[in-house]
Amino acid sequence: MSEIRKHYFLDEYCIIASGRSKRPSAPKACDEGRRSSECFFCHGNEMKTPPATAVYKDGDVLRDNDDQRVSGWDVRCFPNLFPALSPDAKDISSSDHGVMKGYGFHEVIVESPDHEDRLHLFDDERLLLLMRVYRDRTLYYQAKDGIEYVSLFKNWGKKAGASLEHTHSQLIATPLMPPSLLKEMRAMSILERCPYCDIVEKEKDKERLVYENHDFIVIAPFCSKVPYELWILPREHISHISGFNDDMLLSLGKCLGAVISDLDRTIPELAYNYMLFQIEDPDYHFNIRIQPVTSIAAGFEKNTDIYINPVPPELAVEHLLNGSRSLHLRE
């Protein structure tokens, strides 16, 4: 029997269509990838991209020159060759349509020089480095004049929007705050207590718990929009990645590595997106949302913004933890 489930604290809904709850299949994330010798993101091909604004190598942070590139790097960050927003955007005269100039920044974060590398194969040292890069680059762009929000996300697989299979994340710094986050903040402002703190308290012992360590829990949310959706939440009320010390960054990296590994084991080479949600406002609660791509939004979803999910989150957790090392892992 189907259920209409409400979001924890927003006026949003999803339909859990449990009558169609077979474990879904999905096309492989990387079935049409570019060969390593042709990949712009691979080591040795640095001249095929814009000069890097940050190169992480052996514990140092370096920069490329216009005519010379840093080699032997661990993580490389450079402007997107086809940016959604640009720091050079020209002023646009006002109109009745609410047009503003496309000012901002769009950066690619190449997480490994190895074309065949995968996030869930990273060891602790590389997970910590990636989380440090996320923190560094977020703070770097948030300090830019006119920037209101830094969107940090990863698209893995063609079905999730990745044009190249080489593992990478992206960052888009915008001159406006996303309406979805403003909506969250408005809803939170009328509550006596942070709703995400309540979620941590309520879900930490429930059947929707996927993974936990000292600093974070990972849950399949009660109101999952898509099969195998996961949320990573810090136990402590922290609004922004800048509030994490290195121990917490490592804990966060371990969460990502563990649950991406669980997803890959459940549906091999599954395409997914993950997104960091954070605001430098003490009332907000940092979170990461992982949304695998097992189907596409169709007419009903686009007409109503109500998503039909054929796999109840409780069943998704059973699938993910079938033979997994992750359940109730305490460190």
Image (spheres, helix red, strand yellow):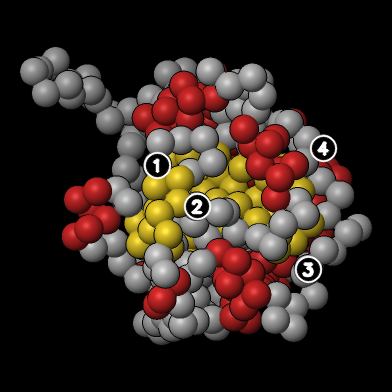
Q: Where is mark 3, residue-wise?
A: 327
Cα separation, mark 2 vs mark 3, equals: 21 Å
Mark 1–mark 2 Cα distance, whole angstroms, equals 9 Å
Earlier in the chain: of badge 4 and badge 1, it is: 1
Q: Are marks 1 and 2 in contact (CB under 8 Å)?
A: yes
Of residues 35 and 297, which is closer to you in this image?
297
Sequence-wise, which precedes: disc 2 or disc 3? 2
Percent coordinates x, y for residue 71 in the rendering = 64, 61
Which residue is pictured at 60% across the width and 66% down the height? 314
Q: Quadrant of residue 31?
A: bottom left
User: Where is mark 2, residue-wise?
Assistant: 223
| Number of callouts | 4
| Furthest residue toward front | 1
Q: Name the residue: 24% across, 25% down.
A: 101
Quick one: SS at disc 3? loop
Question: Residue 69 vs residue 199: left or right?
Answer: left
Residue underneath mark 4: 245
Q: Amino acid at mark 2?
A: Cys
Q: Quadrant of residue 174?
A: top left
User: Residue tagged by mark 1?
Assistant: 12
Q: Nearer the viewer, mark 3 or mark 4?
A: 3
Quarter containing the C terminus: bottom right
Q: Amino acid at mark 3?
A: Leu
Work out how far the residue at label 3 is from the one at label 1, CA to CA, in angstroms: 29 Å
Describe the element under mark 1 as helix, strand or loop.
Answer: loop
